[in-house]
Amino acid sequence: MSPSRSEIIRSHPIGGRLEEYHELYNICQYQNEIDPLLQREADDGTKNKLLDFLMAVQALPACRILSSSRGSGTLFGDISRITSTIDSGQAQFDRLLPLLKAVHNKEPDEIIWDKVYEAVTEPTPAPRPLCSFQTPLIRNTGSVANSSELRSNMDTVLREELDMYVDIPKFYDTFFGYIQTIAQAVFESCKEGEEPLFREGTGWTGWPEGAKEAPVLAWLSGAIDKMIQFYEEHAPGEAIRRRPLAQPHKPLKGSTAKRTLDIGFMDGTKPLEDGKYGWSQILVPGELKNNPEYETQSRQDMGRYAREVLAAQDSRRFVLGFTLCGSLMRLWLFDRLGGIASEKFDIHEEGLRFVSVMLGYLLMSEEQLGFDPTIVTNADGSRYFKIERNGEEERLIIDEVIGRARCVAGRATTCWKVHRDGDESRTPLVIKGSWQYPERDDEGELLREATEKGVVNVARYFYHATVQVEGRDYDIRDGVRRGLDITAASNYNHAGSRPPLSRSGSRKGKSSRAASRKRSSTCVEPSLPPSKRQQSQPPSTPNRVHRRVVVRDYGQPIYKASSRVALLAALEGCIEGYESLHRQAGMLQRDISPNNLMINEDEESASWKAFIIDLDLAIKEDREDASGARGKTGTRAFMAIGVLLDEQHSFMHDLESFFWVLFWICIHYEGPDKANVVEEFEDWNYMNTETLAGVKKGAIADEGDFLKSTAEHFTEYYQPLVPWVNRLRRVVFPNGGRWKTPNKDLYSAVREILRNAQEDPNVIGLN
């Protein structure tokens, strides 16, 4: 039996044979950013470097053994075809950048060879041209559907989601400068006595040799207790309730997968009612590593912690945290644009700074820690929003949190069910808060226009505003980050591309016992040639603003429908709403997914019985200008094949998304809100868009295969829908392929199938 691909790769390791090409990714990425024409004509220097790189790949022992992607021959021949193309002057950056990035990041051999295969596979051209203002797709951890959220999957998406900038000047002064006076007094107490906690020249007493996790956690807890004691001596009558939580091997409650935390600050020491601690209690997360060489890895861990904290706390706008790698500490802030961090410092050499940080986390107000001051909490624990509408102030009392996106960077949508203060009927309204690129159309204005034009089955407008704090619109750049400049970060790429995960250390240049150790080569980020840096000015830095919309319609996602008939009726109503939005208001919603399709089965309710929400990504169909927004997030499992292939968005794509929503629900739900994770389809959340487009094409191309697949994968509860979903497949994908010409008759054709399905005795449950 021939060895498998994995066996060949394991027995023929790459080793350090590609090490000299680590810098090539930066060079090619830079050129690709500043001049897309270089896709076709590479300069001689870059062309020669690419040719040398590909010949080095061909020289790898595994390359002459691994099978060709074409079915005959070896991978060596496939690479030769790219080499000849580059030799003729075509750079092929789009095909090679993922491979170059994998080499640059020192990914495992298996991943590098995967990228080689992707590079040599001929791309399938999209049937329609990409519109000049089409918004690119960016993955986001909040967009996964029915997933177990394994780290092996989620970490890849999280890396794509997060821009993380380090060594930001003035970070420490901005967030901890206010506490210097009391911190100095506490630090002086740390140096007093026969056995002081801190000694000049040697640092903190009792610091564990080797900085292993358990001893460091014990040392930290003891040191913090001492600082609290000294603070209360200097500030009589002021007690500190916050304490560190150090249970690194016990998962915290509230995450989809089991997630642990090295150390964190919380209010008091009392657990939740079931005796467990949860992410909802964590005020400041911290990550420990015993060696500074693991500092890059600690950044990913911090991003993971920030995601859990933000998801569990509905009023949290940002999260402060810290990493301690050996004795090197870095301070972090995570918000809806990503993460920014201070310069590193050695806690033994800068004892006062360490005391200031610990006291800061213990003493900061909730607003300083990132909680939203515009959500007011009463003494009895009830909460409300204040709005000004028609010249009068109103209070909207929060009844419950409907949902919150589980992500760090992105729109981070949160929805609350509320009612107006004084309304005895407690008629429900829904508040939606999200962080929008300021260049995007304001969703509130789009909803108001749709409501005024009589659009049916779309959430009706009540109120909207940009959130204000201290009389100013609240945003990330000036509000959360307080004007800190990411372009001054040590890993900011002035070519405009995303920052690398790793970079050499702080620019402060101070000597340090920990920093002086030999560093792993993964901590060094090759810089661009000086001549290249001078050719481009830094692009404007991104920003997001905090906006709120209030609508008059309340419901639940359609997968919570009480019956199959109710689900189909709701889907029919939502399609009617989409058509009304399209025909009467000229808008494309562009984000059809189960959580954006609502059902209300309360006969007494004044809400639509079925309706669409979320116009965050909606555009006017006749829009001619670019949105200016940096990226788009969405739930890729429900995206139309054409959208995955970068076609200009059409109403036909959204109608196709309705098909994928029903298909997905039938696979993942045993009944009303009884969700499953199905491994085969979980991968749809994580595979690249081109691959997913191919998988979807294969799923719908042949009727026999489709019927076999749905019979196998639809849950028992939804088996009666198999023939009806197949009929939808026939009209949405004529002749088993994608539509070629827009057809507005598709609206009525799809609705008719859904209407007829509601009368089927098998669907009703009579048989």
Image: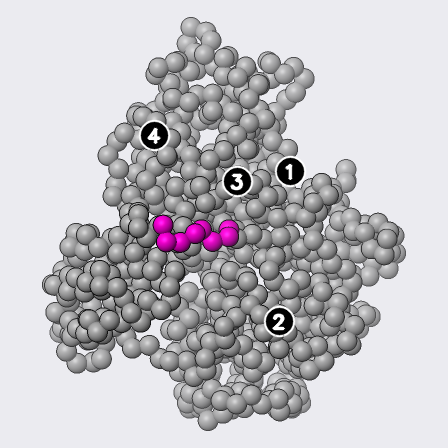
Quadrant hosting residue 612: bottom right
- Picture coordinates of residue 118 (x, y %)? 29, 70
State the separation of the CA atoms marked 4 and 3: 21 Å
- Type of amino acid at the residue the image marks with label 4: Gly
Residue matched to label 1: 367
Query: Going from the N terminus, do you reach mark 3 or mark 1 first?
Result: 1
Residue matched to label 3: 484
Residue at position x 51%, y 51% in the image: 541
Specify the farthest residue to the bottom.
735
* Residue 717 in the figure: left or right of residue 599: left
User: Alpha-carbon neighbours of circle 2 within 10 Å: few (<14), some, or many (≥20)?
Assistant: some
* Residue 182 in the figure: left or right of residue 220: right
- Type of amino acid at the residue the image marks with label 3: Leu
Q: Which type of secondary structure does the marked residue at label 4 adopt?
A: loop
**Visible residue check, residue 417:** no
Residue at position x 71%, y 63% in the image: 444
Image quarter of the N terminus: bottom left
- Picture coordinates of residue 308 (x, y %)? 52, 48
Q: Which type of secondary structure does the marked residue at label 1 adopt?
A: loop
Residues at badges 1 and 2 in contact (C-beta under 8 Å)? no
State the separation of the CA atoms marked 4 and 2: 49 Å
User: Alpha-carbon neighbours of circle 4 within 10 Å: few (<14), some, or many (≥20)?
Assistant: few
Q: Which type of secondary structure does the marked residue at label 3 adopt?
A: loop
Q: Which residues are magenta?
A: 534-541
* Residue 130 in the figure: left or right of residue 530: right
User: Alpha-carbon neighbours of circle 3 within 10 Å: few (<14), some, or many (≥20)?
Assistant: some
Q: Is residue 535 magenta?
A: yes
Quadrant hosting residue 277: top right
Label disc, if present, on residue 619 of the rendered structure: 2
Residue matched to label 4: 509
